[in-house]
Amino acid sequence: MGGTIALLPAFAVLSYLLECFAVAERQVSRERELAADQAGASVRSPEVFATALVKLHAFAGVWEGVERAVVQALREGMVCVNLSKAYAEAVGRVAGLEALGRVMGAQLSHPTDSHPPLSVRSRCLGVEFNEVAADALAVAPRGAAIRLISGARRLEEEISRAYQLVLAREGGIELERGEGSG
């Protein structure tokens, strides 16, 4: 017990140093993220990049609902042929001003996320939220990038089968022979 008490000052100093390092590392990471945003925006325009960021923040959580529905369907012996299409349809159902209203101060949640809040990222790009809000709600554009990929539907369906097999395995769901392959 006495040895443990003797270590307390060293533990306090190490904790302080670790916290100082973490604060400095977060600042450097945020600066890198903002520089990466600038590089991304240079490919097309700050407005297009900001629109993509708003969509990402507004609709990232929709995937969780799609995934829960797919797991439930797998438990009931059903599969989803195209998860990409299911996600796009789910986003289409929730795309509205309410979805956008809660994103400006939001941060994507991930244990190692160093991204600044969307409001900071947008401001650094020189783009105001209201300038891109309408474009962010356009979730089914005519010139969707998926059209650039040859055989996209087939690839989406293959990935959907593979992902559902992973979900079934992780959830302890036994699929009948042939399920997830057709």
Image (cartoon, helix red, strand yellow):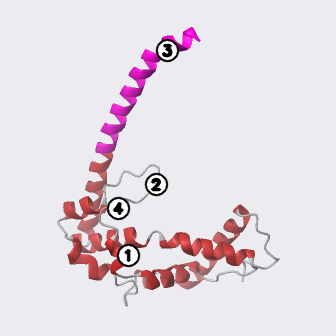
First in sequence: mark 3 vs mark 4:
3
* Residue that carries the numbered disc 2 in the rendered image: 110
Quarter containing the N terminus: top right
User: Residue 152 in the image: x percent, y percent?
Assistant: 52, 82
Q: Quadrant of residue 138?
A: bottom left
- Magenta span: chief secondary structure: helix
Q: Report, in whole angstroms, how far the alpha carbon at label 2 lies from the one at label 4.
A: 12 Å
Residue type, label 1: Ala
Nearest the viewer among 121 and 8 is: 8
Quarter containing the C terminus: bottom right
Residue type, label 3: Leu
What's the residue at 39%, 83% (across, down)?
Answer: 139
* Residue that carries the numbered disc 4 in the rendered image: 106
- Residue 56 sits inside the magenta stretch: no
Q: Report, in whole angstroms, how far the alpha carbon at label 2 lies from the one at label 3.
A: 33 Å
Q: Report, in whole angstroms, how far the alpha carbon at label 3 lies from the one at label 4.
A: 40 Å
Q: Residues within 10 Å of mark 1 (few under 14, many from 20)?
A: some
Q: Quadrant of residue 48?
A: bottom left
Q: Is residue 156 above or below residue 22?
A: below
Residue type, label 2: His
* Residue that carries the numbered disc 3 in the rendered image: 7
Is residue 146 at least partly visible in the picture?
Answer: no
* Residue that carries the numbered disc 1 in the rendered image: 99
First in sequence: mark 1 vs mark 2:
1
Q: How many marks?
A: 4
What's the residue at 29%, 81% (across, down)?
Answer: 135
